[in-house]
Amino acid sequence: MKIIRFADLCAQGRVAGQRVFIRADLNVPQDAQGAITEDTRIRASLPCIRLALEAGAAVMVTSHLGRPTEGLLGVADSLAPVAQRMAELLGRPVPLHADWVDGVAIKPGELVLLENCRVNVGEKKNSEALARKMAALCDIFVHDAFGTAHRAEASTYGIAQYAAVACAGPLLAAEMDAITLALAQPKRPLVAIVAGSKVSTKLTILKSLADKVDQLIVGGGIANTFMLASGLNIGKSLAEPALLEQARAVMAAMNARGASVPIPSDVITAKTFSPEAVASVKLATEVADDDLILDIGPDTAARLAMQLQSAGTIVWNGPVGVFEFAAFEQGTRAIARAIAQSSAFSIAGGGDTLAAIAKYGIEQQVSYISTGGGAFLEVLEGKTLPAFEILSRRAQG
């Protein structure tokens, strides 16, 4: 996919003295008092901001935060805590501007943070009038918020239509490169791990991947549904019996290509869903009617780990068991360690997946960790994200 990269514009000397508008993702978690509890997204935005400042641009940055009501800026909606943290990380003042749509006074070398963009009336519906006003503020629009790439809003899509130049920031460009490497030009075998509580929420992903991957590893409630579709008893485990035919269709599509969906040969069960529940390892053929399947068993985990060791590319979305409970984390831990030890190019995304990566300390061993939850899932579904579409179109001239 051809796009204009902000880093290239900087290297070509085309940014000095220009007004640069960066759409970042600064939607950080906060406690009840408004204090930031985790600043990864702020840190991830800094390379683009530093790039613009070092190139001699007048730099404007905005983001959404939470779910404000358009037209009303409440205290909890303000980016003030973000401005404070950004100033600490950059070692320079970061003034926060409200009511900025009709104009921003800024000079080259200066940096301002523009208040929560979702407060602007017409933002979510991608108002043309609002988008044109935003575009008029800048010479160069930089989209650097992959977490919003699946949304066509005024500050993510509309402004890219009307700005003189629209390009991808380093964070978004890295996401696009990693996704292309993993899905469009993968080194084979391509193995995807898709896990979660419900098949229905990831059915389109499973169908899309069934046409692409060599192994489709399913876990969690999704695996239970596939086990049930294979004729196995799953006791009182979470599953979706109404989707058995859909699961069988995915397996049939994989088999027709000489690929497969590995069904667990053993599982870890309990009688109750609780961190204190007694865990029992059972063959998949010996699950009792009152059992809950809460993890894959050690034989299954070892078999899947071997497949991951020989993979060329790995896409990971979702833990394979209830990894929050110590007795039912072995499967996810084995998968995580196998990915860490594999020489494959690995890309991982989704909130629970990132939590597992952090828990097992394999951040440095995963080739690329995606910053966008919903956007990552839509890419796996085979959708073209609005941000990718408009930036590609603008790159055509």
Image (cartoon, grey):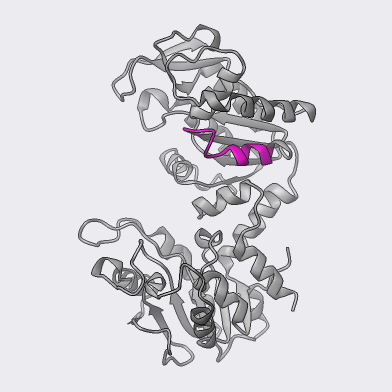
Range covered by the magenta-colored residues: 196-209
Quadrant in which the C terminus is drawn: bottom right
State the image quarter where residue 387 is shown: bottom right
Which residue occupies the foreground of this view, 172 or 232? 232
Let me know if residue 56 appears in the view: no
Vertical placement of residue 283 versus 300, above or below:
above
> Above or below — where is 183 with respect to 390?
above
Q: How far from the left and from the top, in percent, is residue 327?
A: 37, 22
Answer left or right for 209 relative to 72. Answer: right
Q: Residue at x 51, y 61 (%)?
A: 148
Residue found 26% across the figure and 65% down from its top: 76
Q: Quadrant of residue 93?
A: bottom left
Observer-nearest residue: 15 or 11?
Answer: 15
At a point 54% along the width and 26% down the height, the residue shown is 242
Q: Is residue 372 visible?
A: yes
Whether 201 is among the magenta residues is yes
Q: Quadrant of residue 164?
A: bottom right
Provide residue 351's location: percent of width, then percent of height. 45, 46
Q: Is residue 188 left or right of residue 314?
A: right
Residue at x 60% of width, y 81% of height? 162
Q: Looking at the picture, how far across and down is residue 38, in whole percent? A: 34, 56
- Left/right placement of residue 248 relative to residue 365 reads right
- Horizontal side of 146 relative to 100 (left or right) equals right
What quarter of the picture does the N terminus occupy? bottom right
- The residue sitting at the right extreme is 257
Residue 172 in picture, x, y percent from top left: 58, 64
